[in-house]
């Protein structure tokens, strides 16, 4: 990907680490997935990691343009299986959170039988949810086509706000992403970016 929007990058001396600057505010996440996803050319908002930013709020200024790779059907199937497993785990955890009071009482009482019964019930609900919604956690036909023919970064889907797409000049993005970089991924020779936002 190509990242920009760090206000500290303007006139930054060579060797200065970039990528953590910005205004003193964030923008609430607007993740519209799977309609908007990380195909090549997608314009997305950068953000800090989940450990500091569990609500996935976007940077007030930093953005990135997706480049990524093209993937085979086999590679996409493997990623899809992994995404489904993660989605099932998240769904199970959300069900468990709804029963947290009961879980804590059973743990305090050392009620292993009750905990096992509740776990089996939540596993059954999770499996039913995904059996009834086979595409849940997987890729759409549009995603599969884009990732196999155009390219992108599927592992970022559902994690960052995608808010636009390069409609002209994708070849320039390709040239930028191919430049030699120093440690920290800053280009060895600075590149000035200028873009026009159209609605």
Image (tube, grey):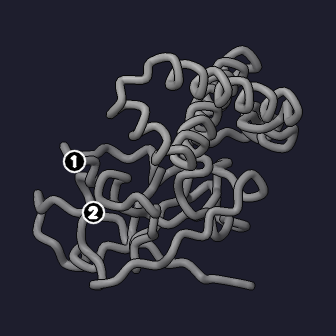
Which residue is at 27% across, 84% downward? 24
Q: Earlier in the sequence, mark 1 or mark 2?
A: 2
Q: Is residue 171 left or right of residue 139?
A: left
**Which mark is on residue 19?**
2
> In x, y percent, where is residue 116?
54, 19
Say which quarter of the image contains residue 111: top left
Q: To which residue does mark 1 refer?
A: 184
Q: Are marks 1 and 2 in contact (CB under 8 Å)?
A: yes
Which residue is at 41% across, 39% downward? 105
Q: Is residue 65 left or right of residue 17?
A: right
Q: Is residue 11 above or below residue 162?
A: below
Marks 1 and 2 sit apart, C-alpha to C-alpha, by 9 Å
SS label for mark 2:
loop
Q: Is residue 29 above or below residue 155?
A: below
Say which quarter of the image contains residue 149: top right
User: Tag 2: Cα neighbours inside 10 Å, few (<14), some, or many (≥20)?
Assistant: some
> In x, y percent, where is residue 186?
26, 54
Nearest the viewer among 139 and 2 is: 139
Which residue is at 64% across, 32% downward? 88
Q: Is residue 157 above or below residue 128?
A: below
Say which quarter of the image contains residue 11: bottom left
Residue 146 visible to the viewer: yes
Q: Pick the quarter of the image with the C terminus.
A: bottom right
Q: Is residue 43 above or below residue 122?
A: below
Nearest the viewer among 186 and 50 is: 50
Which residue is at 40% across, 79% downward? 60
Residue 71 visible to the viewer: no
């Amino acid at each position: 990907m190509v990242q920009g929007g760090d206000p500290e990058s303007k006139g930054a001396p060579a060797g200065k680490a970039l990528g953590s600057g910005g205004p003193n505010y964030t923008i609430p996440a607007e993740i519209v997935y799977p309609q908007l996803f990380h195909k090549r050319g997608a314009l997305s908002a950068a953000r800090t990691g989940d450990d500091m930013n569990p609500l996935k709020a976007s940077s007030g200024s930093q953005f990135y343009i997706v480049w990524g790779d093209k993937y085979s059907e086999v590679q996409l199937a493997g990623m899809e299986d992994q995404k489904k497993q993660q989605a099932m785990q998240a769904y199970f955890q959300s069900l468990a959170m709804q029963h947290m009071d009961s879980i804590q009482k059973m743990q305090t009482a050392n009620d292993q039988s009750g905990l096992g019964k509740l776990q089996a019930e939540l596993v059954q609900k999770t499996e039913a949810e995904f059996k009834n919604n086979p595409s849940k956690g997987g890729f759409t036909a549009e995603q599969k086509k884009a990732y196999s023919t155009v390219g992108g970064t599927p592992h970022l889907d559902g994690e960052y706000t995608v808010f636009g797409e390069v409609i002209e000049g994708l070849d320039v993005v390709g040239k930028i992403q191919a430049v030699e970089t120093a440690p920290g991924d800053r280009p060895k020779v600075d590149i000035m970016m200028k873009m026009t936002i159209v609605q």
